[in-house]
Structures are given as structure tokens and as C-alpha cells.
Image (cartoon, helix red, strand yellow):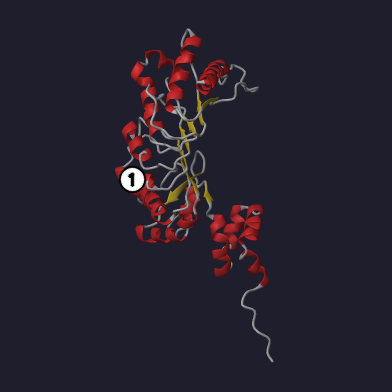
């Protein structure tokens, strides 16, 4: 009697077990994982989720799509690389990879001027749109910099449809989408728990800070530049309790500054922050470490005093509320 033909080789059976496949792929470099998925169809589908789970270089992502890739050039000054965009029909193959993307970082890269410079915005918008359609599991999106060009409404709409829990926008809001454009994204992300905005831009006023928080009932962490020194200009209506029903602690990371008298300003800010999270608590954190041993001229020195004073006043307010 002939022996039954094995349906799957032993090596492939290992990768069919998700727990083992994750351990193996986690100890191997991503470029080597990408090579393994080219061995055979079974290995392709077993390893694909781990290769595409986290993408921090969209140029490599685009290079996986037929028609796209990275082109290197030699110049008199220094060698440089540009991204070659795939055609719209070829881009449809991205739907194979998109369902497995959970964390994506988009950064700016030069696009070949001789291969469709005018399609740069459209190509990136198409990728985001395909993520919104095919990647219901994506939770983290980071966009480092899109320069000073206006972002199209179509792109904003696509980003806002992603089921995000964490969002990092590294661009300058005023130079790109404006505050209204930012709100159009935030208004469609009710599940967001972690929001990071670029700290090297114009600070938001306290009213804008409140507007941002009111978009997110589940927000737990936010990094944002704010005009904290304008707290002395707040009126009684600014201290109205927010409608937030969250009982979670909100961590606010920023560069805190207090006008004189600092103690009085800290009390005002504590009351204001407490009103934004009436059922929970608020903790202030410094954006930069308080001391950098390599910073001889102290340009990156952060005074911990304002942050500590605000936290102390917030703590006192919490104790009073529990007593009442």
C-alpha cells in the first residue's frame, strides 16, 4: 500500500502556527522576512501579516507594488534616491497587503520629476484611501512631514476614515490643513486614545486645546504645544465643565510656562484642566527631559517647576472633590 502523500512540508507547518510564526519573524530582520515570503505561496500567506504589521518606510511599501520602487542617482554633490510611483492600476495590488497593516508611518520623500511629479499627492492619497477600505485593523498612523503644501480634502477624508487609536501628526497645522482641517480629521476619530502634534509649530490657544479634547471622549494621552501663559486671560465661561464622561487619567505632554505670579497662574490652569476632565484626573508631563548632559548652552533645558506646580494644584483639587 502506498503511503499517503504529505500535504504540507514540516517546515511550512511551523509557520502555519501563528504563535511560532510571530516568534520566528520577530527575531529575523524585516528584509529577510520579506525575502522568505517570496519562497512559495504557503509561506507568503503565513508570513505576510508579520512583515506588513508595522510599516515605518512607505518607500519600501510602495516598492513592493508592481510599477513602483526606489531609484538611486549619482550626482556631483552626493548620491540621492527618489521614489518611483506605481500606476493607478498597479496600485490596486496594495489591497493584498493593506489588511495586515496596523501601524504606518508616512514621511516625505523626493519623487522622480521625470516620472509623474504631478501624481505625488494623488499617489499617497490612493494609498491612504486603500488603507481605509482594506485595513480595518490599523490602529496607529504617523505622518511626519508633508512640507508646506495644502493637503487635499480627499486626503483628509481618507485619513479620517481609518479606525485609529493612536495618531501622530508631525506637520505644521497652520501651513497645511489649518485648524479647521485638523478638526475635520479629529471629528471622525472617536476611538482615538493617543494624539501627538508637532511641538515645533505655533502654539495652540487654550480654546483650541479644549476643542481638540472635546473631539475625543476616550483620549488618554496628548502631546501638544499650548499658550499656557495666556491662562490669566480666561473668563468664567471658560471653566464650564466639559461633557466628557471619561473617568480615565488624561496625560498632557507639553512645554509648560507660567506667568507671574506663577502660583496663581498654576491654580488657574489646574482649575481649567480639571474642568476638561470632570470625572477623571489630569497629569502634566514635560515634553523634553529636564536635563541633557550634552547640552552645554542649556538650549534644551526644561524648567520642571511650572509642570510640578500645576500637578500639585490638580492634586489639591482632587482631594477637595473627594472630601465634598
Residue positioned 50% across, 22% down in the render:
321
Decide which of 161, 278 is in the foreground and name it: 278
Decide which of 229, 310 is in the foreground and name it: 310
Q: Is residue 117 visible?
A: no
Decide which of 255, 76 is in the foreground and name it: 255
Measured along the vertical axis of the image, is residue 279 above or below residue 133? above
Image quadrant of residue 40? Answer: bottom right
Residue 275 horizontal/vertical position (percent): 43, 24
Q: Secondary structure at mark 1?
A: helix
Image quadrant of residue 294? Answer: top right
Residue positioned 48% across, 14% down in the render:
267
Residue 5 horizontal/vertical position (percent): 64, 82
Instruction: Spot the residue most to the bottom.
Output: 1
Q: Please count the marks in the image.
A: 1
Residue 59 horizontal/vertical position (percent): 48, 49
Residue 6 horizontal/vertical position (percent): 64, 79
Residue positioned 47% across, 8% down in the render:
260
Label 1: few (<14), some (14–19) or many (≥20) C-alpha neighbours in 10 Å? some
Decide which of 90, 250 is in the foreground and name it: 250
Residue positioned 59% across, 16% down in the render:
297
| Quadrant placement of the N terminus | bottom right
Instruction: Spot the residue most to the top.
Output: 261
Image quadrant of residue 277? Answer: top left
Q: Is residue 181 visible?
A: yes
Pointer 1: what residue? 157
Amino acid at each position: 500500500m502506498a503511503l499517503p502523500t504529505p500535504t504540507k512540508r514540516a517546515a511550512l507547518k511551523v509557520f502555519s502556527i501563528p504563535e511560532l510564526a510571530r516568534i520566528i519573524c520577530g527575531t529575523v530582520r524585516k528584509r529577510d522576512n520579506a525575502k522568505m515570503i517570496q519562497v512559495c505561496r504557503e509561506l507568503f500567506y503565513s508570513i505576510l501579516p508579520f512583515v506588513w504589521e508595522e510599516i515605518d518606510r512607505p518607500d519600501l511599501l510602495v516598492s513592493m507594488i508592481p510599477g513602483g520602487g526606489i531609484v538611486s542617482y549619482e550626482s556631483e554633490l552626493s548620491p540621492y534616491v527618489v521614489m518611483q510611483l506605481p500606476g493607478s492600476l498597479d496600485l490596486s495590488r496594495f489591497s493584498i497587503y493593506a489588511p495586515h497593516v496596523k501601524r504606518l508611518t508616512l514621511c516625505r520623500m523626493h519623487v522622480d520629476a521625470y516620472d509623474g511629479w504631478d501624481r505625488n499627492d494623488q499617489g499617497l492619497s490612493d494609498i491612504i484611501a486603500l488603507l481605509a477600505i482594506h485595513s480595518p485593523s490599523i490602529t496607529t498612523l504617523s505622518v511626519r512631514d508633508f512640507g508646506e503644501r495644502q493637503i487635499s480634502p480627499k486626503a483628509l477624508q481618507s485619513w479620517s476614515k481609518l479606525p485609529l487609536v493612536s495618531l501622530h501628526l508631525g506637520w505644521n497645522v497652520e501651513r497645511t490643513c489649518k485648524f479647521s482641517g485638523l478638526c475635520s480629521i479629529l471629528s471622525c476619530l472617536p476611538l482615538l486614545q493617543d494624539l501627538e502634534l508637532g511641538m515645533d509649530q505655533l502654539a495652540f490657544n487654550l480654546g483650541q486645546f479644549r476643542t481638540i479634547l472635546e473631539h475625543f471622549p476616550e483620549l488618554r494621552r496628548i502631546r501638544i504645544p499650548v499658550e499656557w501663559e495666556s491662562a490669566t486671560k480666561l473668563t468664567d465661561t471658560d471653566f464650564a465643565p466639559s461633557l466628557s464622561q471619561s473617568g480615565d487619567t488624561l496625560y498632557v505632554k507639553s512645554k509648560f510656562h507660567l506667568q507671574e505670579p506663577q502660583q496663581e497662574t498654576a491654580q488657574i490652569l489646574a482649575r481649567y484642566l480639571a474642568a476638561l476632565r470632570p470625572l477623571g484626573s489630569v497629569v502634566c508631563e514635560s515634553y523634553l527631559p529636564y536635563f541633557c548632559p550634552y547640552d552645554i548652552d542649556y538650549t534644551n533645558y526644561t524648567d520642571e517647576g511650572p509642570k510640578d506646580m500645576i500637578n500639585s494644584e490638580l492634586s489639591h483639587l482632587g482631594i477637595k472633590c473627594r472630601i465634598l
